[in-house]
Amino acid sequence: MKLWEKNFEINKEIERFTVGRDREMDMYLAKYDVLGSMAHITMLESIGLIEKDELVQLLAELKNIYHACENGDFVIEDDVEDVHSQVEMLLTRKLGDMGKKIHSGRSRNDQVLVDLKLFTRHQLKDIADEVKSLFDELIGKSEQYKNVLMPGYTHLQVAMPSSFGLWFGAYAESLADDLLFLQAAYRMTNRNPLGSAAGYGSSFPLNRTMTTQLLGFDSMDYNVVYAQMGRGKMERNVAFAIATIAGTLAKMAFDACMFNSQNFSFVKLPKECTTGSSIMPHKKNPDVFELIRAKSNKLQSLPQQVMLIMNNLPVGYFRDLQIIKEVFLPAFDELKDCLQMAAYIINKIEVNEHILDNPMYDPMFSVEEVNRLAANGMPFRDAYKKVGLDIEAGNFVPDKNIRHTHEGSIGNLMNAEIQQLFNSILSEFHFERMEEAEEALLS
């Protein structure tokens, strides 16, 4: 069944090529297609295009289809083109010609737009929840090991004193900034395109404000042409938010792999969190962090993939946009998987509390000595030269009792402020509006 089918049959090879992976991708969108249809027909009844008794029957059957999606029982049949066709066909099988009325005032163009937005905002909530789980683990570890010093590096050379409090806390604050990108992506996503039809509106007196409220959107995409132009743009903006979080994960994973190696031995992964070698019996490989790094680097390419598909398209709908779904829709599960694994492994990671027993790290206290001499009246450049000469002569004896007190330093991590920043950003998403609207539709 094809919603556009008339009195001819399309070439089977052309059909295979044009449908592509759309049925597979549409399974991500199925229950959201149902929600969009529920809001749309409720609005159609309010403007007299569906009778009240028809609305009652259609909503009841759509709820059944929604629950089938939730339970994993929904399928798109082989001879059905897409999720929109499948839902309409199920309604028509059950309710007859009444099921054919649900498409009035809609095009598959605005139907897939609203499906994508409903799907994406739920995925963004899931991502935000997983980011919070990792954030909490990082802040917890930062507090737990705030007094354990470690070398800080520049140019991969031992530089100055750092601490595990700083290292864990840095990635926590990075996630707070990443959450700002996610919030911006959510706000741009959470606008209603329904009623834009094929991108030029409808002669039916549609009530777009009503569907906006029914679906819990913050507002609508007002201009119907712009609503259609949002296809691809939304995915690109969300992809940048995904890539930003993935960038934090990739950097943290690289650090963890390096610090876990025997040459550093700063951290240790429990043996049950590592894999072995088929030939070297001593190996305990940090495969989890290596795969997080690789998957996160892959996710950082997502914005470019989306841009290259949609960048040179003029105004209006084009079938090119179908291909964006193939790279965009699966990306959320991959990022969530990486966030879950990162939170799990950070919780299990063990810290070496005796790194500085090794005298090779003594030079990292050189700046502390320079500052001590300068604070006692010696000109900074003279102090710098004296300490440098002492190190070269082998006469440098570090004072490892460092005293950093300024905001954000070893002795003043400001974790409470970082926590407050994160929670403040998270609270501004207002996911509850989305959830309340959808619960009301399904009740």
Image (cartoon, rainbow, N blue to C red):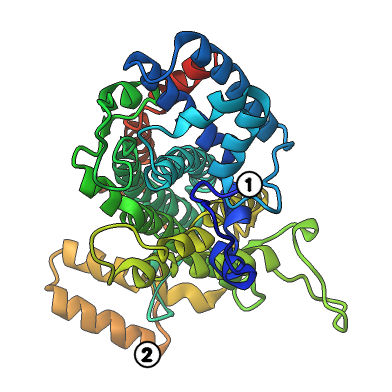
* Residue at 58% over, 25% down: 62
Count the labels in the image: 2
- Residue 246 visible, this angle: yes
Foreground mark, 2 or 1, reads 1
Residue 243: which quarter of the image? bottom left
**In the image, residue 183 above or below residue 268:** above
Find the distance from the CA under tag 2 to the CA under tag 1: 41 Å
* Residue at 51% over, 46% down: 3
**In the image, residue 149 above or below residue 206:** below
* Residue at 27% over, 57% down: 316
Residue 186: which quarter of the image? top left
Instruction: Measuring from the top left, give residue 46's x and y in whole percent.
Output: 34, 14
Q: Nearer the viewer, residue 123 or 394?
A: 123
* SS at badge 1: helix
- Position of residue 108 in the picture relative to residue 217 (left or right): right
Residue beneath disc 1: 347
Query: Which residue is outermost to the bottom?
Result: 393
Instruction: Measuring from the top left, give residue 138's x and y in whole percent.
Output: 51, 47
Inspect the image, locate mark 2, and give the three-letter code of the amino acid beneath it: Glu
Instruction: Measuring from the top left, give residue 225's x and y in whole percent.
Output: 22, 48
- Packing grade of label 1 (10 A; few <14, some 14-19, many >=20) is some
Q: Nearer the viewer, residue 231 or 152?
A: 231
Inspect the image, locate mark 1, and give the three-letter code of the amino acid beneath it: Asn
Q: Nearer the viewer, residue 404 or 231?
A: 231
- The mark nearer the N terminus, 2 or 1, is 1
- Packing grade of label 2 (10 A; few <14, some 14-19, many >=20) is few
Quadrant for the C terminus, please.
Answer: top right
* SS at badge 2: helix
Q: Which mark is residue 231?
A: none
Residue beneath disc 2: 392
- Residue 404 visible, this angle: no
